[in-house]
Image: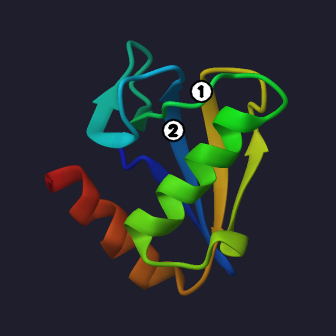
């Protein structure tokens, strides 16, 4: 199984499959799609209008990884279910935190 992130010099790019309009905000572990790519599954209560679901996802990921909200941003897939989030910080520490999320 591939990792749901890619290391960068200034952090990681995290691959996420987002489900909006859920009962609660939560992360549901790692999922591998048919093409072999892995992504973190996330659900948020926000609706996908005016970027509300993306903002809720950014807050959820920031809290889960223990980084400031300003360190997380959607960089690809703004209107799609599959998104790429850039998380700024120490790449090794962030990679370890993401791997711990997949165990929980």
Disc 1 is placed on an element classified as: strand
Residue nearer the viewer, 30 or 20: 20
Please indicate whether residue 80 sits to the left or right of residue 50 in the image: left
State the residue at coordinates (38%, 12%). Answer: 34
Residue nearer the viewer, 27 or 6: 27
Q: Residues within 10 Å of mark 1 (few under 14, many from 20)?
A: some
Q: Which disc number belongs to residue 16?
A: 2
Chain-order first, disc 2 or disc 1: 2
State the residue at coordinates (33%, 71%). Answer: 97
Please indicate whether residue 100 sits to the left or right of residue 70 in the image: left
Q: Residues within 10 Å of mark 2 (few under 14, many from 20)?
A: many
Residue 77, x across and y down, in percent: 74, 31
Please indicate whether residue 71 sits to the left or right of residue 46 in the image: right
State the residue at coordinates (54%, 52%). Answer: 14
Residue occupying the far right of the picture: 50
Q: Determine the image quadrant of residue 2.
A: top left
Disc 2 is placed on an element classified as: strand
| CA gap, disc 2 and disc 1 | 6 Å
Please name the residue that numbered disc 1 is placed on. Answer: 82
Image marks 2 and 1: residues in contact by CB distance under 8 Å: yes
């Amino acid at each position: 199984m591939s990792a749901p992130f890619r290391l960068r010099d200034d952090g990681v790019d995290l691959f996420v499959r987002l489900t909006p309009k859920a009962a609660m905000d939560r992360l549901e572990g790692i999922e591998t799609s048919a093409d072999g790519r892995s992504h973190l599954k996330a659900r948020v209560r926000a609706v996908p209008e005016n970027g509300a679901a993306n903002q809720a996802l950014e807050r959820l990921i920031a809290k889960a990884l223990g980084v400031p909200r300003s360190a997380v941003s959607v960089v690809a897939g703004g209107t799609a279910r599959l998104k790429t989030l850039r998380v700024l910080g120490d790449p090794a520490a962030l990679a370890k935190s993401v791997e711990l999320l997949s165990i929980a």
